[in-house]
Image (cartoon, grey):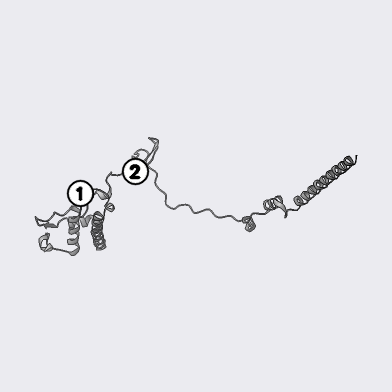
């Protein structure tokens, strides 16, 4: 009987302790939820209630930004009676996009100053072709500089080509023939120097 009484008293004490702990936890949670500065929920609620930072500096004045000026240049409308063939861009007649069509020849495959047939492969693939390409670039710069000076003297590019084409050259039979680009460069050089003789002996120049 004594053990039964002790066990019953211990059971009631345990139930009372658990009840007090549960009541204290409920009251503590309610206090944290009521305080916005405490707890995860309070912080989340305070962050949601904050005003955006960009809205703090917005000030309603009632003013408005004026519209941009209208373009002064008006492009003419295409003539519908004589439609032009579209080579690039959107073609409404065919209903598809027309891509730009290249010539199919790369720049390094074209004849140049020292390569009458171009290069077999891109010149930067090996050091020999790269050095040769750099030499051709020097000739291209020389030609461009002389043409700029001749244009400054009052000649157009068509006039430069016409006046430079009158010069002819006598080349050495044992030496390689000049390419068309190199021939035009030498003709421009003669026109730039103002040579009066239209026949130039290249053998004397090389000697």
Residue ID at (22%, 53%): 112
* Left or right of 54, for residue 91: left
Look at the numbered disc 1 and give the secondary structure of its residue: loop
Residue at disc 2, secondary structure: loop
Q: Residue at 12% x, 57% y: name it.
A: 169
From the viewer's perspective, is 1 left or right of 69?
right
Which residue position holds label 1? 117
The answer to which image quadrant residue 9 occupies is top right
Viewer-proximal residue, 1 or 113? 1
Considering every residue shown, the one lying at the far left of the view is 173
List x then y, in percent, for residue 74. 42, 49
Q: Nearer the viewer, residue 112 or 65?
A: 112
- Viewer-nearest residue: 53 or 6: 6
Q: CA distance from mark 1 to mark 2?
A: 26 Å
> Mark 1 vs mark 2: which is more N-terminal?
2
What residue do we see at 20% from left, 63% from top?
A: 192
For residue 145, say whether it is visible: yes
State the residue lying farthest toward the top. Answer: 94
* Residue 123 position in % (x across, y down): 26, 52
* Closer-to-camera residue (68/111): 111
User: What percent of the width, then of the height, locates residue 189?
Assistant: 19, 61
Q: Residue 83 shows which numbered tag?
A: none
Disc number placed over residue 100 in the picture, else none: 2
């Amino acid at each position: 009987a004594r053990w039964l009484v002790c066990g019953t008293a211990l059971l009631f004490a345990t139930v009372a302790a658990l009840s007090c702990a549960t009541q204290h936890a409920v009251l503590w949670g309610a206090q944290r939820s009521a305080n916005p500065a405490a707890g995860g929920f309070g912080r989340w609620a305070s962050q949601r209630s904050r005003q955006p930072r960009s809205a703090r500096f917005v000030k309603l004045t009632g003013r408005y930004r004026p519209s941009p000026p209208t373009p002064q240049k008006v492009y003419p409308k295409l003539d519908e009676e004589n439609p032009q063939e579209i080579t690039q861009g959107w073609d409404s007649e065919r209903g598809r996009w027309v891509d730009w069509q290249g010539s199919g020849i790369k720049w390094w495959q074209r004849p140049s100053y020292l390569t009458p047939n171009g290069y077999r492969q891109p010149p930067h693939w090996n050091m020999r072709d790269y050095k040769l390409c750099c030499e051709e670039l020097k000739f291209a710069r020389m030609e461009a500089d002389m043409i700029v000076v001749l244009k400054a003297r009052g000649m157009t590019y068509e006039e430069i080509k016409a006046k430079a084409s009158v010069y002819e050259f006598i080349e050495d039979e044992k030496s390689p023939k000049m390419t068309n680009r190199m021939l035009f460069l030498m003709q421009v050089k003669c026109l730039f120097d103002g040579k009066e003789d239209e026949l130039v002996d290249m053998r004397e120049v090389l000697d």
